[in-house]
Image (cartoon, grey):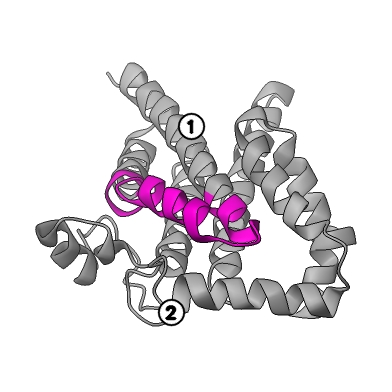
Amino acid sequence: MTDTASASDTAFITECLRRTELYRWFAGLLSCRLDPALLSAYRKGPGRAVLDNLAAEPALRPGAARMEAALDVARDDGALARALGADFSALFENGRVSPRASDWLPEAEAAAEGDGGDSDGDANGTAALIGDRDHVAVLLDLMAQLVEAGLDDWRAAGGIPTGAAMAASWRRQARFLDRHLLSWLPAFRDACGEHDRDGFYAGAAMLLTSYVLLDRALVAEAEAACAAAAP
């Protein structure tokens, strides 16, 4: 294997792992309240480093900055955790902003979401992790699994990024992003911005939507490369 090929392989694996980690990070952020210890990590520990790294990307900076502004208020960790916990409850548990795709989609599409969507969207036969199957955290975890499956396809194909197996993987990822996330996340983001009192979850929804849009562009580029390489 040449040095160039090795560097390309490393970059591909690193990007897949980063995508998987970020989708699961967003899923965790939107699945439960922050306790004081985790909140402290976001204010001055490893969690803050994650936000700072995301803020380095211009398209992601507004959402990350809004989250950081909510974290930097003059409250101790316990008081801020209680305030953000109340925001989480008001937004996602008490009905201000539904975290479920089916509440944002037309009736026919919502029915498909509730059934788990198309076979590509449920490629791994994953059961719901929390509550209803179309909860945003479940969908984000499913997307992470599709990225992992794509990495497995790439390895099985001998590290060829433009082969038939990878073309199918990119198509699955594109369809999942379009149907199960981008079909409703912009409306979810806007509602969080309107109803979130302290701004942390408004920022998280902004950051998530911006990231998914960036990831969709990455998938489109990879899918186009496969098409260009096809015989």
Label 1 environment density (alpha carbons within 10 Å; few <14, some 14–19, many ≥20):
some
Q: Are there few (<14), some (14-19), or many (20+) residues within 10 Å of tag 2? A: few
Q: Is residue 224 above or below residue 84?
A: above
Determine the main secondary structure of the stretch shown in magenta. Answer: helix
> Where is residue 12 drawn, in percent x and y?
60, 37
Q: Quadrant of residue 119?
A: bottom left
In the rendered structure, does residue 34 fall within the stretch colored magenta? no
Q: Where the C terminus falls, by quadrant? A: top left
Badge number at residue 94: 2
Query: Residue 218's mark?
Result: 1
Nearest the camera: 162 or 214?
A: 214
For this orientation, the residue located farthest to the left is 108
Whole-percent x, y for residue 147 in the image:
47, 51
Report helix, strand or loop for mark 1: helix
Left or right side of 137 for 171: left
Viewer-nearest residue: 11 or 106: 106
**Residue beneath the point at 82% across and 59% down:** 73
Task: Give the label, 2 or 1, closer to the camera.
Answer: 2
Look at label 1 and name its amino acid.
Answer: Leu
Q: Position of residue 162 (x, y in %)?
A: 41, 29
Q: Which residues are magenta?
A: 177-205
| SS class, disc 2 | loop
Instruction: Please say whether residue 160 is visible from this viewpoint.
Output: no
Q: Earlier in the sequence, mark 2 or mark 1?
A: 2
